[in-house]
Image: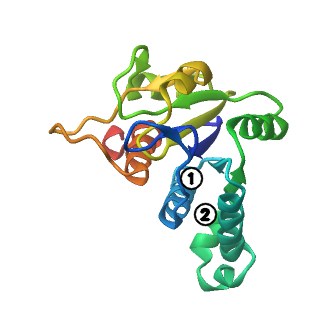
Amino acid sequence: MSNRIYIGLLHYPVYNKTGEVAASSITNHDLHDLARLCVTYGLNGYFVVTPLELQRKLGERLIAHWVTGPGADYNWTRKEAFKLARMASDLAEVKARIEDECGKPARLVGTSAKKMEKQVSFGEMRKRLAKETEGVWLIIFGTGWGLERGFMEREFDYLLEPIRGSGDYNHLSVRSAAAIILDRLFSVDSTDE
């Protein structure tokens, strides 16, 4: 697949547990694990998005530690993963940076644990990505209790169906959800040989 594919982890606008729109905090685990997913699935980059300046500075410091600081010599696999990670203040900045890099705008694919209208299945999106090989794509994950609904409806070109388990519980960590979603979209199925 020759698509240019990026992921974004948005910390705003998300719901907090009381249903208010808020900005969530970045976490070390999210930074590490989503960067590793990018390398594992051959993606072009990973944007961690927060409007909070101190949170961006913290993220930049963590990334620098693993790419150019002492962590670069300590663990080369993290260095490779973190080379793909970047901080951004909002989705508009991410879209502009991707367009500058690729020469065309990215199509936005949103994710949500909630059932919404006009969601596409993982199979449909996988086929679209395989068919439109010259495309630029940005797959967006939210933190907190999910991205604000109006934001998703305004911004995303596509919205993926939720991950459904065998029970009613539906609150995966973003790291787990991202791993499942990226595997469903980009894995090489050994049974297809």
Question: Please, what is the three-letter code of the amino acid marked with disc 1?
Answer: Cys
| Quadrant that contains the N terminus | top right
Q: Is residue 70 above or below residue 39?
A: below
Q: Residue at x 39, y 39 (%)?
A: 184
Cβ–Cβ under 8 Å for marks 2 and 1: yes
- Mark identifier at residue 19: none
Badge 2 density bin: few <14, some 14–19, many ≥20, Cα 10 Å: many
Q: Position of residue 129 (x, y in %)?
A: 55, 28
Q: Position of residue 63 (x, y in %)?
A: 67, 67
Q: Is residue 20 above or below residue 160?
A: below
Query: How much space separates mark 2 and mark 1, taking CA atoms?
Result: 7 Å
- Give the secondary structure at mark 2: helix
Q: Quadrant of residue 53?
A: bottom right
Question: Please, what is the three-letter code of the amino acid marked with disc 2?
Answer: Ala
- Mark identifier at residue 81: 2
Q: Residue at x 72, y 40 (%)?
A: 94
Q: Position of residue 54 (x, y in %)?
A: 69, 62
| Residue 21 visible within the image | yes
Q: Residue at x 70, y 41 (%)?
A: 90
User: Disc 1 designates what residue?
Assistant: 38
Q: Is residue 108 above or below residue 140?
A: above
Near-viewer residue (105 or 28): 28
Q: Residue at x 53, y 19 (%)?
A: 153
| Quadrant that contains the C terminus | top left
Near-viewer residue (89 or 3): 89
Q: Is residue 90 above or below residue 70?
A: above
Does residue 47 appear left or right of residue 111 in this picture? right
- Give the secondary structure at mark 1: helix
| Residue 128 visible within the image | no
**Quick one: label 2 or label 1, which is nearer the N terminus?**
1
